[in-house]
């Protein structure tokens, strides 16, 4: 299990690749996508800036996760099937894998 909270996206990607090179077994990546506590801002014009920043960072993080899921899905399938997938197979496989994931709880907005 990789504790991914303390890693930047680049360092986390490198750590995932390092672990992947060491084992064929499944492993987990523990992520915390809670909003950061931003320094307070003054003025009415800045009242919504922290929320926008958090939502923007959340969308970026979700896209990073989707890219990693796509990469891991293709690599795992190629290892299991022992064949290299063509571009159409990769796209179909990734689309199916991403449809099965529920990112709605991570999407910006109210989840009360």
Image: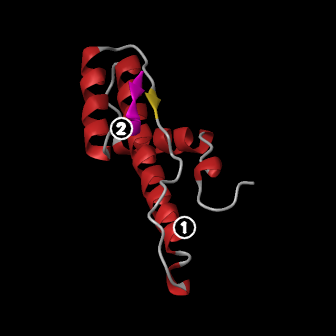
Q: Within 10 angstroms of label 1, few (less than 14), some, or many (20 or more) residues?
A: some
Q: Within 10 angstroms of label 2, few (less than 14), some, or many (20 or more) residues?
A: few
Q: Is residue 56 above or below residue 20?
A: below
Q: In this view, does 39 lie to the left or right of 11?
A: right
CA separation in Å, label 2 and label 1: 22 Å
Q: Residue at x 51, y 70 (%)?
A: 52
The answer to which of 70 and 96 lies nearer the viewer is 70
- Residue 62, percent from left and from top: 48, 51
- Residue 35, percent from left and from top: 52, 53
Mark 2 lies on residue: 6
Quadrant of the rendered structure where residue 80 is? top left
Q: In this view, does 52 lie above or below 66?
A: below
Choose the circle earlier in sequence order: 2 or 1. Answer: 2
Which range of residues does the magenta coloring cover? Answer: 1-5
Mark 1 lies on residue: 51
Residue 65 belongs to magenta span: no
């Amino acid at each position: 299990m990789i504790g991914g909270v303390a890693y930047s996206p680049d360092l986390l990607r490198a750590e995932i690749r390092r672990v992947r090179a060491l084992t064929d077994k499944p492993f987990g990546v523990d992520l915390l996508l809670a909003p950061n506590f931003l320094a307070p801002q003054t003025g009415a014009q800045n009242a919504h800036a922290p929320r926008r920043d958090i939502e923007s960072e959340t969308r970026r993080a979700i896209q990073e996760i989707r890219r990693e899921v796509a990469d891991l899905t293709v690599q795992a399938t190629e290892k299991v099937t022992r064949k290299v997938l063509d571009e159409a197979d990769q796209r179909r496989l990734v689309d199916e894998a991403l449809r099965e994931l529920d990112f709605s709880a991570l999407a910006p907005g109210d989840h009360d």
